[in-house]
Every structure is written in structure tokens, then in C-alpha cells.
Amino acid sequence: MKLTKTVVDRCSIPSPVPPATKCQVFLRDDAMRGFALRVTSGGVKTFILEKRIKGKVKRITLGRYPDLTAEQARRQAQKMLGEIATGLDPVAKAKRERDESITLGEVFEDYLEARRNLKESTIHDYRRHLKDAFADWRDKPLKRINKEMVATRHAQLGEKSPARANNAMRVLRALFNFAEGEYETEAGESLFPDNPVRRLSNARSWYKVPRRTSVIKAHELKSWYEAVLSLTDDGQELVRDYLLLILFTGLRRTEAASLPWSQIDFNERSLTVVDTKNGETHVLPLTDFLFDLLKQRKAAVDSPFVFPGTGKTGYLNNHNKPMAKVAKRSGVAFTLHDLRRTFITIAEGLDISAYALKRLLNHKMTNDVTSGYIITDVERLREPMQRVTDFIMEAVGQ
């Protein structure tokens, strides 16, 4: 039958239909081949056009009824059939038009959809950079972001923090690199072949940010350690043990905070970090100090995490106030990564072999051919791990 207003109004899916069931029916027009009405179990009516284009049958959505009348949909379908007859692909054309006007914010969401293996912490950082550095660019078409704008914004951000300016531009560079390969013309040519962030490299405008080298020095460890042990008020012993775990293992802040009890093996006396920065599972032996620390923590908490928190992640993420208290009491200013660097510095000073040191820190050794033949299991790390612990305990007077 011919799709008219009367036919469309009367068309519906017969009852009864189970509430949770999703189904649809198609009412096809006899006067125009490929023109049809799709009706869902929810009563939504949509005009469509089905046509073979370049060997493949494609379904093109024309619009919903009654926003689009039957006659308007018919004229739109007729126009598309004419374009197809001349060799055009309306689907590809619509995609290209959408891609050509795509905004920075839309590219970012497409990027996250394509990069589903990104860690939550990475996504959080990316969103923060987009909000802090490019909030006024989110709704701007990507094509309108040029080299001069990038250079100017980088300089503006650098006035507050050169390091954050660089990191924000690295995120923007990643989005443009993604767009270069993701959005193409019908001929397969990129819609975004030029990455404007390259201007920073060409002009050598990246800020030179010296790598942080701060550590807790050997003579500072005692006062720092005693200040940490004083964290006993209002549940601050959670942060106390968290800080000690990082110092005595060299784990990264999130690796330590998100450590679940399921990855602690008290029988083998080891801990395992699965979700690591380099993607490789990290296994460390537990020294006597760490074994006792975790045993006491296990008896004190009822949570799947060693360090439970009240946020949506379920693990500890609020430790600034206790850390500030430690810094004030000890006179030692520090960051969480300073604790990791302290562990590394102590291990290097004890002449622990380079291979064992890299394993303790879970650093990749892809450029070292010899390392590929060395299997360092947890037991071979127990002695060097104990040496680091002994050094710390001696420094703090224990």
C-alpha cells in the first residue's frame, strides 16, 4: 500500500507485547521501492529508505513521524534516490558533513569510545585537561582550531604552569592524531591531515620542565617516620599504613590505593598489582615489616580493598590533610611520588642489580636483549626487597 497520513496514523504493533520485549515492524510503500515506515513496540514511527549502494544494502533514516509528514518523507526519499542514481552515497555524504563540523568535545567522546582500554585515572586526567585548558573550545568545530590558536593557548597556560600546559597540549595532540585516522572523505582521504599541535615542535615551543628529583633524605626518614606513626586520630591510621606501604614497596600511588585483598597472598607472602602503568602484572615479595603491616590492616577493615574509601571507586583517595599533618610535624615536605623515588634511590644506593631493580619497580626492559632471557620470580626479589627494608628501619632507628 502507499504510505499516507491515514495509513501511518493507523499503523501500530498488535497487542499484547511483553513490556520488556523490543520489536519492530516495517510497512513498505508500494509506489516507491525502498521507502518504508518502521514502527517500534514503543510506538515510535520512523520513515526510512533502503537501497543497495555500491553493492551493499543501506538503511537511511529520514526522520520521525509526525515531525516529518508522509509526503515530506516521500519527497526526501525521492531526492536521495536521484542522488544514488548519479553515483552519490547519501550515507557517506551525511557522515562526511557530520565529521566536517565535528567539535572538539565530540571528538573527545569518540576517542574515549574507541580507546576503551584506557584506565579510569587516565580518562579522569584527560577530562580535567579538557575542562581546565579547553573549556571554551569544547563546542568549537575541530577544523576551526588552528596553529596560531594552539600556540597562543599554550603560552597562556604556561604562565600558570609550564608542566600542565605541556600535558594539556599532549592531550590535544592525541585527539587530532585520532581525528586524522578516524574521519575521512568518501575517497578515503583524512578530513584532518594537519595536526596544529605540531607547531609547538616545529617552533621548539614545548616548555622544558625539569624532572622532579625530590626524595626523603636518609637523615629525614626518622622524623618523617615518627610523624607518620602519629597518624592515629579519626581513622588516619588508614593513611598511615598507605604511606608506609608506598615507601616500603615503591608502588605508584594508585597501584597502592586500589590494591585489593584478593591480590595479597599471605601464604606465599607476596602482593600482586594487576592494573599497572605498563600493563604488565607486578609481583612483589612481602618482607616481615610489610607482612605484619598488612595482617594488622586486614584485621582492622571489612572491605575488598586494603585501603577502603568513601568515593565511587571504593578505595582511598582523600589523604591530603593527613599528609599535610605529617609534613608539618616532621618538617619534611613530600609528595606520594617522592616516596617511590625514595625507595628507588635507596635501592640504587645498595648496589642492587639493574635487573632486580627494574623488576622491583616494574620497569620494562624492552631495549635490553639480555633481560629477555632472565626470569626474575618473586623469590629472587625477596633478598633485595629485604635489604631496602633493613636500610629504612635502620635509618628510622628501629
Image (cartoon, rainbow, N blue to C red):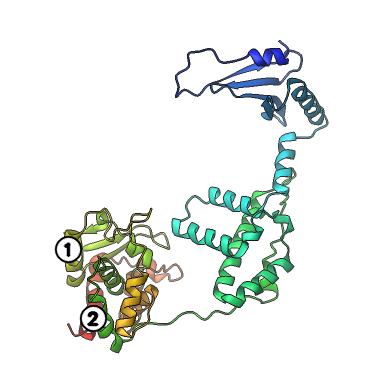
Res. 126 mark: none
Type of amino acid at the residue the image marks with label 2? Glu
Judge depth for marks 1 and 2 and give the one in front.
2
Q: Quadrant of residue 26?
A: top right
Q: Quadrant of residue 172?
A: bottom right
Q: Quick one: 25 or 361, which is closer to the camera? A: 25
**Callout 1–callout 2 Cβ contact below 8 Å:** no
Up-down: is 293 above or below 109? below
Q: Quadrant of residue 72?
A: top right
Type of amino acid at the residue the image marks with label 1? Lys
Residue 275's x, y, as percent?
Answer: 38, 58
Specify whether residue 371 is in view: yes
Label 1: state its secondary structure.
helix
Q: Residues within 10 Å of mark 1 (few under 14, many from 20)?
A: few
Residue 173's x, y, as percent?
Answer: 62, 63
Res. 295 mark: 1
Specify whether residue 351 is in view: no
Name which residue lies at 41% across and 59% down.
279
Residue 280's x, y, as percent?
Answer: 38, 60
Q: Classify residue 326 as left or right of residue 108.
A: left
Q: Which residue is mark 2?
A: 226
Whole-number angstrom distance, CA of label 1 to CA of label 2: 21 Å
Residue 326's x, y, as percent?
Answer: 31, 78
Label 2: state its secondary structure.
helix
Q: Residue furthest top?
A: 1
| Image quarter (top left, top right, bottom left or bottom right) of the C terminus | bottom left
Name which residue lies at 20% across and 63% down.
297
